[in-house]
């Protein structure tokens, strides 16, 4: 990774485009989708947005994501649940989270762990970003542990 000198005492690593976390956001509400995309993009994530689970599955077939977020309430059946289940079956196992009731809650679903709920409102965008970072970090930790087990 390239290093940039800020002054003689501090050096900062520039992120290469491949080191930016990719997020797939599947939300059937245009306003929510655009709002979340803006928040996540501003925080430095690369965000791909889709409106349906079939579009999301197509993206999962052609790209690799560190996090898949889904809010597909208007879709028939359990579209969000089916999408997240499909995402967790991918070889690279992205972190997944269900967005519930128009940005009011996010429910993480991490490889068989108990689900927890985080409230999201206009005044706690930092909590959303913290949760997203935690989900991606947890996914990376689990991926590293799996790789270490395969080596030993």
Image (cartoon, rainbow, N blue to C red):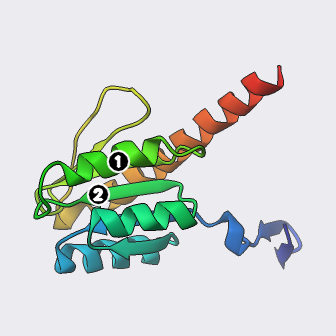
* Residue in the foreground of this view, choosing between 71 and 130: 71
Tell me the residue at 27%/68% (across/down): 52
What residue would you read off at disc 1?
84
Q: Earlier in the sequence, mark 2 or mark 1?
A: 2
- Find residue 98 and report its horizontal and vertical position in percent: 27, 50
Within the image, what quadrant is residue 58 found in?
bottom left
Secondary structure type for disc 1? helix
- Find residue 55 and report its horizontal and vertical position in percent: 36, 70
Q: CA distance from mark 2 to mark 1?
A: 7 Å
What residue would you read off at disc 2?
70
- Find residue 103 and report its horizontal and vertical position in percent: 18, 61
Q: Residues within 10 Å of mark 2 (few under 14, many from 20)?
A: many
Secondary structure type for disc 2? strand
* Residue in the foreground of this view, choosing between 21 and 30: 30
State yes or no: discs 2 and 1 in contact (Cβ < 8 Å): yes
Label for residue 100?
A: none
Tell me the residue at 18%/67% (across/down): 122
Is 27 drawn above or below residue 69 in the view shown?
A: below
């Amino acid at each position: 990774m390239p290093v940039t000198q800020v002054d003689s005492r501090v050096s900062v690593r520039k992120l290469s485009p491949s080191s930016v976390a990719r997020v797939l956001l599947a939300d059937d509400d245009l306003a929510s989708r655009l709002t979340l995309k803006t928040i996540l993009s501003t925080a430095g994530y690369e965000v791909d947005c889709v409106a349906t689970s079939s579009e999301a599955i197509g993206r999962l077939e052609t790209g690799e994501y560190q996090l898949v977020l889904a809010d597909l309430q208007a879709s028939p059946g359990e579209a969000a649940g089916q999408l997240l289940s499909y995402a967790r079956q991918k070889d690279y196992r992205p972190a997944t989270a269900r967005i519930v009731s128009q940005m009011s809650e996010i429910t993480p679903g991490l490889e068989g762990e108990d689900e927890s709920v985080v409230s999201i409102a206009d005044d706690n965008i930092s909590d959303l970003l913290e949760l997203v970072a935690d989900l991606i970090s947890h996914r990376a930790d689990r991926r590293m542990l799996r790789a270490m087990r395969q080596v030993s």
